[in-house]
Image (spheres, coloured by chain):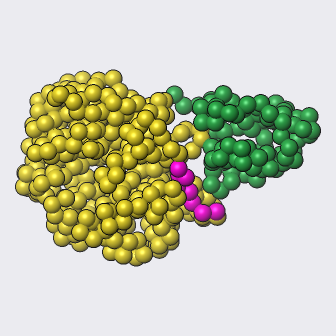
Chain colours: A green, B yellow
Amino acid sequence: MPTLKFTYALKRFFPGLEKTQAKGSSLSQIIDELENKFPRFRTYILDEQGRLRQHVNIFIDGNMINDRIELSDSFSENSEIYIMQALSGG
Amino acid sequence: MFMKSTMLLGTRKGFIAYNFQNGNWKVENLSFEGIPVSIAYADPRNGNWWACLDHGHWGVKLHYSKDRGKTWVETTAPAFPEGEEVKDGVPATTRYIWAMSQGGNKYPSKLWVGTDPGGLFVSEDGGKDFQLVESLWKHPTRKTGWFGGGRDLPGIHSIVVDPRDENHIYIGISCAGVFETTDAGRNWLIRNKGMRADFLPDPNAETGHDPHLLVAAPTDPDTLWQQNHCGIFYSNDGAKNWQEVSQPEGPARFGFAIAVADDNSNQAWVAPANSDEDRTAVKGALCICRTDDGGKTWKDFRKGLPQENCFDIVYRHALASSGDSLAFGTTTGNLFFSSDRGESWRVLNNYLPMVYSVGFGE
């Protein structure tokens, strides 16, 4: 199962969030899993049209995903998926 | 005259509540430290506090507190239905909450919210869920006659509910203008007659106007005031006709904020700024201007306000009145208070973040 890691910034809103194993076989399924465990998690990561928010990034095995609209990037059983914020603002 | 004893601030770095005790304003609560708060709102019907958050990374969020900020509950922020577009090819997502209003005593669970990109939302259940007001979103002028002003996309910054008939509502949109509904949002009338949009090829266009803030007089809701991009405008016939009441040579001319007295529909205050090109304090000095005669004449008051080397301006929601009292916060983090209807001022804080909203509550 792929490993999920998160930016520490998300722990402010979801204190129980920590490194975990994901069951889903797509990014959308993984976000659904997280939404079930942490209600409103989806709204922090995706906008209401389902797109990755402008200042949120997802890395799969060190590479930023390409498809920020449909979240169709694939991963393997051993992948590491990292959900983080863009470093911007002041 | 009686003054409400709570002051709520929405700032670039959090929600701040002040409480008036023993003749002084003291900070009672700081919440959401570090997070931009576009609007801090106290619902006069039940005392609930609302914080409209603009997380740079995580989107627009909405929280309320029933215990004066000790605990907060996150509720579902207004969201556009799947597939909605601002214009063809541009998906609609809530980018900012720019206005919040209670829906009236007759509808104790009703709340209105205005957003960038131009969506008006209503909640019928005390703010648990918000629905897009489709009639306005589908208004034939929206896609072609509305555009950004102050923000990149059109935004609803003013919601004025008539206390005599709470299905009667005015909204202010930058840039579109003033819209009125008499049936709780099913149908809308454009109320821009007499306004000018000097920045358009046709200054008298039906839409595209930029009312920076729209307010109504509590004692006479047919008297409306607006600080517009192109001057100060006044109506005493329920927005059917507007007349400009700016000082031709200023300083009461350009600005963002406007407030009207609780007990006198002809008394109003504005916070002047330099032209739209500069957006700085007029001649490096701050003043608040007041009219007592429906805009025929204005006085500028400066006592207690910085008169040199000053760059502060006042955002549209950052000037508020309550009885004899006024308060305003500035873009450089100064907060001022007056207990004599704006004639003299004292500093409450010089070291705040940029102030987005100031409002009084119980």
The chief SS type of the magenta part is loop
Give me the residue at 45% from left, 64% from top.
B124
A20 shown above or below B143: above
Q: Nearer the viewer, residue B255 or A26?
A: A26
Asked where in the image residue B157 lies, by quadrant, the reply is bottom left
Q: Where the C terminus of chain B falls, by quadrant?
A: top left
Q: Residue B216: x percent and y percent?
A: 23, 59
Is residue B292 visible in the rendered image? The answer is yes
Q: Does the stretch in magenta take in B79?
A: yes
Is residue B332 visible in the rendered image? The answer is no
Q: Residue B193: x percent and y percent?
A: 26, 70
Asked where in the image residue A37 lies, by quadrant, the reply is top right
Name of the residue lying farthest toward the front:
B67
Q: How many marks?
A: 0
Give me the residue at 61% from left, 58% from top.
B91
Asked where in the image residue B45 lies, by quadrant, the reply is bottom left
Give me the residue at 73% from left, 36% from top.
A83
Q: Where the N terminus of chain B falls, by quadrant?
A: top left
Q: Nearer the viewer, residue B306 or B333?
A: B333
Give me the residue at 34% from left, 35% from top.
B17
Q: Does the stretch in magenta take in A83?
A: no
B333 shown above or below B45: above
The region drawn magenta spans B75-82
Q: Nearer the viewer, residue B240 or B108?
A: B108
Q: Residue B360: x percent and y percent?
A: 27, 43
Q: Residue B75: x percent and y percent?
A: 53, 50
